[in-house]
Image: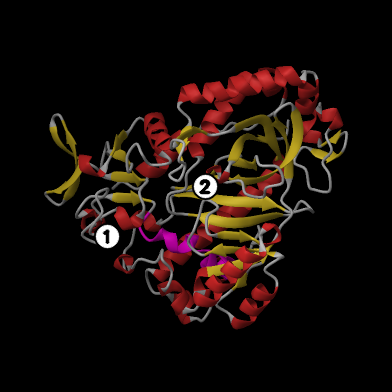
Amino acid sequence: MKLDDYDPGDFYDELFVERGQPRPEAVPLVERINSLSIEELMQRQQSAQKALLRLGATFNVYSDEQGTERVLPFDIIPRIVSGHDWAWLERGLKQRIEALNRFLSDIYGEQKIVKDGLIPEDLIYSSKGFLKPCLGMEPPNGIWCHITGTDLVRDRDGQWYVLEDNLRCPSGASYVLENRRVMKTTFPLVFGQMPILPVDDYAGQLLETLLNLAPPHLDDPTVVVLTPGMYNSAYFEHSFLAQQMGVELVQGSDLVVADGYLQMKTTKGLQRVDVVYRRIDDDFLDPTTFRPDSMLGIPGIMEVYRRGRVALANAPGTGVADDKVIYAYVPKMVKYYLGEDQIIPNVPTYLCWEPQDQAHVLANLDKLVVKAANESGGYGMLIGPHATPEQREDFAERIRATPRNYIAQPTLTLSRAPTLMGDRIEGCHVDLRPYILYGKEIYVNPGGLTRVALRRGSLVVNSSQGGGTKDTWVVGNS
């Protein structure tokens, strides 16, 4: 089956307007794919997957009884975003990150948005991501969210929506870079024909973002990437980004607080560390401040941070902005802090702690998607139309028991993209996670990680739930 025969169906398709009519920016790619036999496509797919295996692009699934390490499934038919769409998305993402950063600064400071009645105080203090030890803290340059992965989706009419924000330890950027490297060898002629915006500046931009946090008087600040270790699901990414930036990859046991500073153990003695790109959750960062049983963090690091002697990216406490209940208030944040209307809309959201919303949700569980406020990776979620009556009743009980912990949203008809499924090309649902860096300015890497649901008919794109990835081509104006 070639793309000539591909049927987009009753969905918004990322490559086709309708059967046999590719979107203008996708024409060279579609023509190239149609020039290949299905056997050649399958061979290139296998070569691409083997290349990713050689590069070590794996991830871990803790619940997998057949062995934890897997190669992230990859589809060689890329997803294309037009330059016009991208320019609009970039503006919207920059606006959103600016508003979220001001929100974080406010709620750990004067809490004006709470005092002015826009967000209930109880919602802030009951959020699992809100950290009371961070009250009154001022991170370097007033920036809390240095690295953000914002999940975007399109509905049936092609409208983009923000699905959720990831401000704690967002993962996936390494796959963007590795996918692109593999695709350049898979379709070299197409890269010569199309004005595809490059993504390989990400590591350099990330390093600049981190260096921006160091005290200005330091000539050669030391940056490290802090990982929980090789058994973490995203360890490949931690080591990859450290290598790409040319900085040390460390674990908590490699660091110690000494003489009032954070120091790294080396063969030549202790070396001061100035900036930590931490890939461990807040709770495990410092056993003297958060979880006393943490073996992953560094005792005393929060006191060093509080004194301004080390910078942490992202700042501790940013997880409150990941809370899916707080997400519902982002449009108000944008208006409150920036005096603007939100550019990229949120998905309409019902808050189960509000009695009227809860009644609507409970009466319509067969039509809605229900999400736990602080879960990620596709866990803690009910897709009502695909759920059994028993599953819906289970979630109804959960909502009644802890209404603060749940939101509900309409079931969007996610856009699809042509995907190689065995010896056929089929439409599979996709989302998009661009990566936004907040340093001296806000930088949005062009494209992002397109995640694709590889189980037929599935709306769940998470790798832990059987999803895979595609390269994302932002096609500029040639």
Q: Residues within 10 Å of mark 2 (few under 14, many from 20)?
A: many
In the picture, the quarter occupied by the N terminus is top right
Q: Is residue 291 above or below residue 188?
A: below
x, y percent for residue 47:
60, 19
Residue at numbered disc 1? 291
Q: Amino acid at mark 2?
A: Ile
N-terminal label among 1 and 2 = 1
Disc on res. 393:
none
Residue toward you, 219 or 97: 97
Dot 2: what SS? Answer: strand
Residue at numbered disc 2? 436
User: Residue at (71%, 30%) from the top-left corner?
Assistant: 420
Q: Is residue 255 above or below residue 168?
A: above
User: Residue at (30%, 54%) from the top-left corner?
Assistant: 284
User: Residue at (35%, 30%) from the top-left corner?
Assistant: 246
Q: Is 177 placed left or right of 39 in the picture?
A: left
* Residue 342 appears in the figure: yes
* Residue 187 appears in the figure: no
In the picture, the quarter occupied by the C terminus is top right
x, y percent for residue 131:
35, 66
Q: Amino acid at mark 1?
A: Arg
Residue toward you, 88 or 155: 155
Q: Is residue 146 magenta?
A: no
Q: Residues within 10 Å of mark 1 (few under 14, many from 20)?
A: some
x, y percent for residue 353:
55, 77
Cβ atoms at labels 1 and 2 below 8 Å apart: no
**What residue span does the magenta drawing correspond to?**
315-335
Q: Is 1 placed left or right of 281 in the picture?
A: right
- Is the stretch drawn in magenta largely helix, strand or loop? helix
